[in-house]
Amino acid sequence: MAKISVIGTGYVGLVTGTCFADIGHQVICLDINVHRIEQLIKGIMPIYEPGLKQIVEENVQAERLSFTTSYADALKEAEFAFIAVGTPSSEDGEADMQYVKQAVDSIVANLDHTIIIVNKSTVPVGTGDWVAEIIKDQNGLDAPGFSIVSNPEFLREGSAVNDFMQPDRVVLGSTDLDAANEVAELYEPLRSPIMITDLRTAEMIKYASNAFLATRISFINEMANICESLGADVREVARGMGMDKRIGPSFLDAGLGWGGSCFPKDVKALTHMADTRGAHPQLLQAVMDINQNQRSRTVQKLEKALGDLKGRRIGILGLSFKPNTDDTRDAPALDIIHMLLEKGAKVQAFDPQAMQASKDEIPALDLRQNPYEVAEGADALLLATEWNEFKSLNFVEIKVNMRGNVIFDGRNLWDGQALHNLGFTYFGIGVPTP
Ligand code: NAD
């Protein structure tokens, strides 16, 4: 079994480290966030991810998984160092590489033996070569002392453990085939297809995959807006399209669009890479514009339904960028709330997991304890995130609690006709208004 160090203990690092431990490897997870590591040592999860807490506990107990803030401890006997630190957007859309750079510098400063550095963070194409240069330039280390492998991660928050354990594919890129094969061995117990390619191609596969998925969502949202003007139903259109094997049904749900910590920054970063190399990423630009438009269009529709939003009370169900996560990074709900507040509306909201993060971003947010409290006194109710627990609400009670009767179903979750029959004015995305 291999000795693995994971640098960065967020959504990707903690899942990666825990799952590697679960398949038998000896793993130590490191973070510079002292509070995060202290919590993990006490058994408190710093993030909400279904199923993760239990596997962390089991593997800590089995002494295959531990946590540290010390690079020296983390790297002492490590054969592999997985980098899983954040790569957020900078002002101009370029990926901010400061955390990767810090991580690499710290690895170099504490490295006294041969190691394979595996990059799991989503990083601009060419980063693997750049990291190799940094390591060669510093500490006078000889090139054979380390190898660089790119291993982009495709897990989704909300189903991260399953995605890691049953990946559609594992992509590895390196100029050192032996190193790539050694990393491939770590994944062998998962019995998934493993693709080995060069460094830059592996890095690009991640961006191209995320850009394609974002494109599918923006595409169906554009179709939804066309359906609205033509009186067609985008849900049926998507179903009919999805039966075509060349198209497939995934990522064809019209709604408020994509958000989160990955699609927005990765599409921006890819656009930036293309722009700065003289390519013309027209499709990517349109994909981002359509997505942003989906949010402002929602506010315009509410304005049309309610008139001036000043003083209007809007209830929001769901704040995380998608269900089953507490992640609110670039969540459509929060963007829409900012716009509503700017227009003078009062906003009250509930989310099963993302209340604290939302309050941190929008202190003026009036948080409620459940959907029925969100409905109290509301002129309109907007469903922003399709958590399972919002699927079968008691709309009779909601109707009694509300001041108005407008329901804006931003994820096409509910039966519009049934809500219409209860006396609501129902709007979905790309579906006929009953
Ligand atoms: P995150 O923000 O949840 O976690 C990053 C962690 O890295 C934080 O805990 C931070 O304290 C730590 N960190 C920062 N600098 C450090 C350093 N120098 N040394 C040690 N730790 C450091 O980020 P995330 O969502 O896990 O994403 C990590 C990377 O994986 C990003 O590049 C992201 O694009 C990519 N990715 C994310 C997902 C996802 O669903 N979140 C999926 C695939 C790929």
Image (tube, helix red, strand yellow):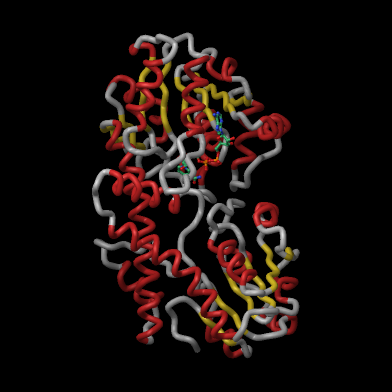
Above or below: residue 423 compared with residue 246: below
Q: Is residue 128 above or below residue 239?
A: above
Please state if 145 lies on the left or on the right of 296 as rendered: left
Residue 318: image location, x then y, percent:
61, 64
Can residue 1 be seen at all in this image of the molecule?
no
Number of labels in the image equals: 0
User: Viewed as shown, does residue 88 lie left or right of 402?
Assistant: left
Q: Where, by quadrant of the figure, is residue 340 drawn?
A: bottom right
Q: Tell me what residue is drawn at x 75 percent, y 71 percent.
A: 373
Query: Which residue is pictured at 51% across the width and 38% down the height?
Result: 86
Q: Could you say where residue 41 lies in the image, as x and y percent from the top left?
A: 69, 29
Q: Quadrant of residue 38?
A: top right
Q: Is residue 93 visible?
A: yes
Of 79 and 256, the residue lying toward us: 256
Residue 114 coordinates in the image, percent (x, y):
42, 12
Say which residue appears at 36% left-offset and 22% top-offset.
Answer: 132
Residue 140 x, y percent position in the rendering: 40, 9
- Closest to the observer: 230 or 104? 104
Q: Is residue 211 above or below residue 365?
A: above
